[in-house]
Amino acid sequence: MTDVVRKDVKQRLEDGDYSCAKELTLSMFSGKWKIVILFHLGTDGPYRFNQLMRLLPKASHKVLTNQLREMTEDQLISRRVESDSQVRVFYEITDLGRTLMPIINQMYQWGTDRIRQLQVIPKFNINEDEAKQ
C-alpha cells in the first residue's frame, strides 16, 4: 500500500476498532493523485492507463498503478479489460465512487475560489500540456 492513512484506517476497520467517519472518507482520497483521477473519471468518463499517464505527467508509472489498484480495491473505480486484436484496459468510476463527486466538486470549487482570492497564477495548466503533445 502506498498510503499510510489508508493502511491505518483499513487495519482499524478490520480490527473492529474504528468510528471516525471523517477519517474514513479522507482515506478514500488520500494519495497524491486519487482526487484528480476520480474527478476526471467522474467528469469525463472512462480512461485507459496511458491516457491517465498523459493527464498526470508528473505521476510515476508505479504510483499511478498503485493508486488505481487501491481505488479498485476500495470499489471507487472499476478496471474493465476488452480483448479485440489487442488487450485494452479501461478505468471507470463506480456508483460508489460517484457518491464522492459532490465532495470532490466542492473541493475543486473551494480551491478555485481560494486561488482567485490569493491572486495566484497557476504555473501548470493541464490543457496547455495536452496541446503540446
Image (spheres, helix red, strand yellow):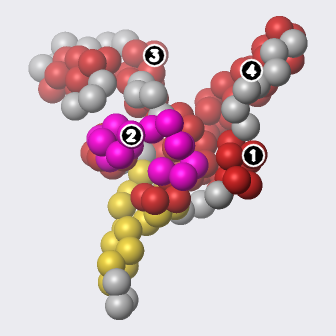
User: Does the stretch in magenta take in 112?
Assistant: no
- What type is the residue that disc 4 sits on? Trp
Density class for disc 3 (Cα within 10 Å; few <14, some 14-19, many ≥20) is: few
- What type is the residue that disc 3 sits on? Lys
User: Mark 2 touching mark 3, by CB under 8 A?
Assistant: no
Dot 4 falls on a residue whose secondary structure is helix
Quadrant where the C terminus is found in the figure? bottom right
Q: Position of residue 31 (x, y in %)?
A: 41, 28
Picture quadrant where residue 104 is located: top right
Q: Is residue 28 above or below residue 41?
A: above
Mark 1 or mark 4: whose residue is earlier in sequence:
4
In the picture, the disc for residue 60 is: 2
Q: CA distance from mark 2 to mark 1?
A: 20 Å
Mark 2 or mark 3: whose residue is earlier in sequence:
3
Q: Which residue is mark 4?
A: 110
Q: CA distance from mark 1 to mark 3?
A: 35 Å
Select label 4 or label 3 by which is in front: 4
Between 96 and 29, which is closer to the camera in this rendering?
Answer: 29
- What type is the residue that disc 2 sits on? Ser
Dot 2 falls on a residue whose secondary structure is loop
Left/right of residue 91 with respect to residue 83 in the rendered view:
right
User: Does the stretch in magenta take in 60?
Assistant: yes
Density class for disc 1 (Cα within 10 Å; few <14, some 14-19, many ≥20) is: few
Magenta part of the chain: 53-66
Residue drawn where x is 15% and y is 26% of the image: 14
Q: Which residue is mark 1?
A: 128
Mark 1 or mark 3: whose residue is earlier in sequence:
3
- What type is the residue that disc 1 sits on? Glu
Q: Which residue is mark 3?
A: 22
Picture quadrant where residue 21 is located: top left
Q: CA distance from mark 2 to mark 3?
A: 29 Å
